[in-house]
Amino acid sequence: MTYLNTEFLQSELSKPFVLPEGAVEHFNTYGYVKLKDVLSAELLSHYDSVITDLVFSLNKLTKPMEERTTYERAFLQVMNLWRESDEVKDFVFSARLAKIAADLLQVNGVRLYHDQALYKESSGGITPWHADQFYWPLSSPKTVTVWIPLQKTEMEMGPLAFAEKSHHVEIGRDLEISDESEAIMATQLKQFEVSEAPFDLGEVSFHAGWLFHRAGPNSSGRPRKVMTMIYMDQEQKIVQPRNEYQHADWETWLLSKPVGGAADSELNPVLFAY
Ligand SMILES: O=C(O)CCC(=O)C(=O)O
């Protein structure tokens, strides 16, 4: 592992990032934005080691690829790593990243919904088309996910792809991530341009909760290692769960806080506020 001192890491993770001109407008119009040089190669190499060790020690999905469902083939998914390691907590609580989220959502502050590592293994399958907010019992669309590849991500690794402007249209909002969502949305999303491109090292994307996105399979022979954080407007309210997944999310990530009240459990700290 590259040794970097805590001061170096914390300084980079807290330093404000200057959004390029037009980034907020791009996010509003297209539902996502890709930003280069947000994190340094040194910092990513360090957290690659720390997060990867944690993912493999906590991962419970060990059955062979051919016995898995489409969802299980898409990635190893390990959530709320910040609670397992103080080092990862520094990363997840990065004010640099949380401020970008607040600025893109044009809100006064953001809370954490949860983090998750998404490791598309070598020979891992597609991530079907879906919109994340299907899973969340939250009152407003003011949510955003940062997708942080821990390595340069070429097309053959399955970089995240976005159906541009699909967050403006209420289609497919009752679909869980599945073969069905992939098949239905592949047809319904024909009216939208799809942005699918590699990610440089240090480049990250932010996508809105209702934006449809997917990823191709990983045929690179190496794992596609990604860390993500989901942010929400600090003013988000909890709504009555509308499906079984939202019910589970309400219990797990919002600690069953009252419906109609603030999404402010101890798992949802404010990560940046003006
Ligand atoms: O990493 C992937 O393949 C999918 C990521 C995703 O769906 C998300 O971060 O919302």
Image: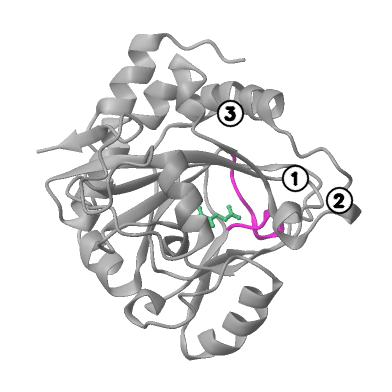
**Secondary structure category for the residue under label 1:** loop
State which tag comes first along the sequence, 3 or 2. Answer: 3
> What is the number of the mark on residue 65?
2
The residue wearing badge 3 is: 48
Identify the main secondary structure in magenta: loop
Give the CA separation, mark 3 to mark 2.
23 Å
78 or 145: nearer the viewer: 78
Q: Position of residue 235 (x, y in %)?
A: 17, 49
Give the CA separation, mark 3 to mark 1.
15 Å
Q: Is residue 245 above or below residue 60?
A: below
Q: Position of residue 223 (x, y in %)?
A: 72, 42
Judged by depth in the image, the label closer to the viewer, 3 or 2, is 2
The residue wearing badge 1 is: 121
Residue at 26% of width from left, 61% of height from top?
A: 139
Q: Position of residue 135 (x, y in %)?
A: 47, 59
- Contact between marks 3 and 1 (CB within 8 A): the answer is no
Residue at 57% of width from left, 15% of height from top?
A: 2
Q: Mark 3, residues whose alpha carbon is within 10 Å: few (<14), some, or many (≥20)?
A: many
Quadrant location of the C terminus?
Answer: top left
Image position of 20 (left or right of 90): left
Residue labelled 2 has its Cβ within 8 Å of some atom of ligand 1:
no
Q: Position of residue 12 (x, y in %)?
A: 32, 25
